[in-house]
Image (cartoon, rainbow, N blue to C red):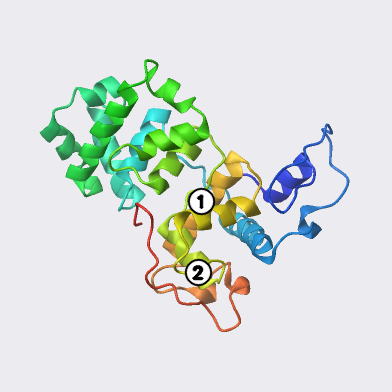
Amino acid sequence: MGVCLCEFESRSGHQTDRGSTAATEQTGPVRGPCLAVWPMSDTARRIRTTYRTLHDSFGGQDWWPSESPFETVIGAVLTQFTSWRNAEIAIANLRRRDALTPPGLAALGGEELEELVRPSGFFRQKARTLRSLLDTLGRFEGGLTEMLELSTPRLRSELLATRGIGPETADAILLYAAGRPTFVVDAYTRRFACRHGLIGTRASYDEVQSIFLGALPADVEILGELHALLVRLGKEYCRPEPRCAECPLRDDLPAGGPLEASGVGGADAVN
Ligand code: SF4
C-alpha cells in the first residue's frame, strides 16, 4: 500500500521545513497546522507534492522485494548498473544454490559465483563485491545482524569501505535492509530533479540527498516509497526521451518545459 504523506503528517503532528517531527501524544486526528500550509522552501514543497502526486498515480510500490535482510543486501549489489529484472534472475540463481545466506554464498567457488550472477551484468565485478561484503561481514561475530545494528554513520562507513560499494548502494542497504531513514539518490532521481530545476546537473550526491531529506519526514517507509516511485517514474515517463504530455508530474514542469539533464548519471548504479 505504501504511506500517504498526508496520513503521516496527520498522525505525526506538525513538522518543520527541515523535516524534524514534533510528534504529539495524540492518537486521534491531530489538530493544528497542516503541513500543506506549513512554511517551507519552494523546493521542499515541490518534492512533497511530487511524492503525493506519484503516490496517487502509481499507488504503493511495496519495495524492497526480498525474503531476508541478507537478500536485500545482495540485491542492492546485483542491481548496480542494471535493471531489477536482471538482478532478480541472478538472485533466483543464488536461491537455487542455497546461496542467499552468508555461509551459502561463501561456499561457492569463484567461477561458480560469477556464473550465477552473470545475468545481472558486470558479473566479475559483482562477484568480487559480494566476496568483499562477506569479508566485511566476517569482521562481526554476530554477522549481518550485528553489522546492521551499528550506528548509521558507522554502518555507512563500513559499507563504503567495502570494495564495489558506493553511496547509492550503501544508502539502499541502510534504508531497505537496516531500516534507517535515508534517501537513495539514483540516476532516475537526478534526471527528474534536473529536468524540473530542483537540482543542478553538477550537484553532488550529498547535496541531492540533503535536499530530499530536508523536504521529507525522517520516515523509513516514506523515504523508501519515494525512491521506488521515482524509479517507476524514470522507467515509464522520465526516460531519456521524456514523455511529459502523459506524465503525472507535468504540472510541476518549468514554464519552458524540461530543463537540460544531459550528463546526469547515478553514483554507483545506472538503471
Ligand atoms: S513531466 Fe517530463 S520531465 Fe517531468 S518527470 Fe515527467 S517526463 Fe520527466
Residue farthest along the right direction in this orientation = 31
The crowding category of the residue bearing disc 1, from other C-alpha atoms within 10 Å (few below 14, some 14 to 19, many at least 20), is: many
Front residue (pair 178, 245): 178
* Residue 17 coordinates in the image, percent (x, y): 72, 54
Would you say residue 90 is visible in this rendering? yes
Q: Viewer-nearest of labels 1 and 2?
A: 2
Q: As displayed, is residue 59 above or below residue 43?
A: above
Amino acid at the residue labelled 1: His
| Disc 1 + disc 2, Cβ < 8 Å | no
Amino acid at the residue labelled 2: Gly
Looking at the image, which residue is at 56% across and 56% down? 58
Front residue (pair 118, 133): 133
* Residue 73 coordinates in the image, percent (x, y): 38, 35
User: What whole-number distance in Å separates the C-alpha atoms at marks 1 and 2?
Assistant: 19 Å
Q: As displayed, is residue 174 above or below residue 39?
A: above
Query: Element type at marker 1?
Result: helix
Location of mark 1 (residue): 227
